[in-house]
Structure formats: structure tokens, C-alpha cells
Amino acid sequence: MKAATVNQPKKQPGRFILYGLLIFAGLVSLFPFYWMFVMATQPNHVINQTPPALLPGPELVTNFTNVLGQIDFFGAMMNSLLVSVAVTAGSLFLCSLAGFAFAKLKFKGRDVLFVLILITMMIPPQLGLIPTYYIISQLGWLSDLKAIIVPGLINAFGIFWMRQYIKEAVPDELIEAARIDGCSIFRVYWNIVTPAILPAFATLGIIVFMNVWNDFLWPLVVLQDQSSHTLQVALRALNDSYSRDYGMILSGTFWATVPLIIVFLLFNKAFISSLTQGAVKS
């Protein structure tokens, strides 16, 4: 008898083309970060030379030392880290709690209130700069990190995102069963809803952390004391109006971006892990 032939998987040229396009898109996306690193290692006179330098230079340590001589880099980084973590944690809790209420609880005026929250997403945040500044100044929070943390603890997009995710991911029957067993509203949220929306937490966490870390305008307005500056405000001092050391500026920008990328990768890993656990359980 002839040996049974094993069906060999057919080659799929479309898959190789897709992978090639994805690799190309990834390289294009990473190139600006690589270019920033290369410029951060070059002396100032090399920045504008033709052809441009494509390989790292010898001035990485020197440029970063110049940054440390101009600003309190690590102090500003700690301020940014404290603000970003506090705002992210508060947003995840408060936005998910509000999203749960709008998705699963019935109360008078629920839909109208949710529409009003969505309308606030259409208003540019710059329009609220003056009244918010007045409130912060009356509270005595100028040059205090509370001036950034408290206004950012909840946002309309976070409520909308959590409401939509909870509405689809958590069955009404599960909540009704928990209520019949005697669970309070908060216990239903904490024990039933929260474990089911981990992917939503990871996604919203990435968005909020990146937005707070990169925020410049509002911290520039309210953080008048240099010791309270966040990293983005502190980096502004490197941009001297008379002489600009681009190698030093890009060195500070590069090292300010590294923690953001690390946090993004950590949240991204949690997001993928949560999706995998949900698929296994289902």
C-alpha cells in the first residue's frame, strides 16, 4: 500500500505580502524615535549637515549631562509620574463606576445626562482654561500638583468608553442574579463588572496615561513654581531663544519618551493577557 500522503499547507502569497506591509509600517512608525535617538547622540553642528547622520554619535552622555545642568530632569520626571499614575488610577475607577451606572442602572434622566456628557466632548478644552484657572486659584492650588490631578480624574471619553464596553461585555442576567443573592450595587460593580472589563481598563489606561504625560498647556498655566514642573514644562526651558543646542533638546526629549514607551508596553501586555484569559474562560 502506498503511504498516505500528508496534505501540505499551501503557500499563501497574500499572507507574506500582509506581513511585509506590517513590518514596513512598523519600521516607518519606529523611525522617528530612532531618528530622535540618533540626533540625541550628535553634537549640535551635525544636526543640520547634509547628508544627515543615520548612525548614533559619541555625544549621548554629554548631551544628557547638559540637560541635567539646565533643568531638574529627574525631579520633573517624578512629578510627571506621580500626576500620570494618580490621574490614570482615578480615571479608571471613576469612569468605570459612572459607565456602569449609565449602562446597567435605571434612574431618572439617565439618557439625558449621558447625552450632556457626550456634548462636552465637542467643546475644546481651551475654552475652559480661564474658569478652571479661577477655581484653582481660589482653592489655593496654584503650583500644586493637585491643580492637575483633580481636574483630570474623570473625563467624558472615559465614561463613554466604559459605558459602551460594560453594556456589551456584562450580561444583564448576571447582574440580576447577583442582586438576587443580596449583593449591593457597589459589590456588583467590584466583584462582577470589574473582572469582566480588564481589557477596557488597559485600553483606557494607555490613553489617559499618555495624554496626561504629554500634557503641556494646563501644567504650564498652573505650575508656576519650578519645583512643581512636570517633565513637559521643564523641557521647555531647554529651548533657549538665543542659542539652541538641538542635541541637548533631543536628548532630553528622548529620555522623557522612554518611560512612556515602557508604560505603554506594560499596559499593552496586560491588554493582550486579558483578552486571552477571556477567550479561555468563554
Image: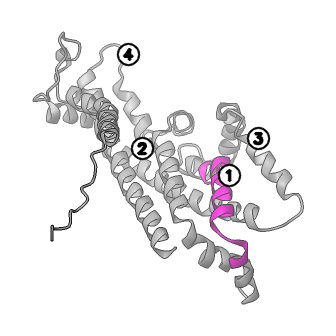
Kind of element beneath mark 4? loop
Sequence-wise first label, 1 or 4: 1
Q: Are marks 2 and 3 in contact (CB under 8 Å)?
A: no
Residue annotated with mark 1: 160
Residue for point 37% across, 46% down: 260
Q: Position of residue 98 (x, y in %)?
A: 70, 61
Q: Are marks 4 and 2 in contact (CB under 8 Å)?
A: no
Residue type, label 4: Ser
Residue annotated with mark 2: 227
Kind of element beneath mark 2? helix
Q: Is residue 155 left or right of residue 27?
A: right
Label 2 crowd bin: few (<14), some (14–19), many (20+), radius 10 Å: some
Q: Which mark is residue 119?
A: 3
Which of the two discs, 4 and 3, sits closer to the camera? Answer: 3
Quarter of the N terminus within the rendering = bottom left
**What is the span of residues highlighted in magenta in the rendered image?**
151-174
Which of the two discs, 2 and 3, sits closer to the camera? Answer: 3
CA gap, disc 4 to disc 3?
40 Å
Residue annotated with mark 4: 241
Residue for point 86% across, 65% down: 107
Q: Among all residues in the image, which is located at the extreme bottom? A: 181
Which of the two discs, 4 and 2, sits closer to the camera? Answer: 4
Front residue of 41/54: it is 54
Kind of element beneath mark 1? helix
Residue 154 among magenta residues: yes
Q: Position of residue 113 (x, y in %)?
A: 82, 52
Sequence-wise first label, 4 or 3: 3
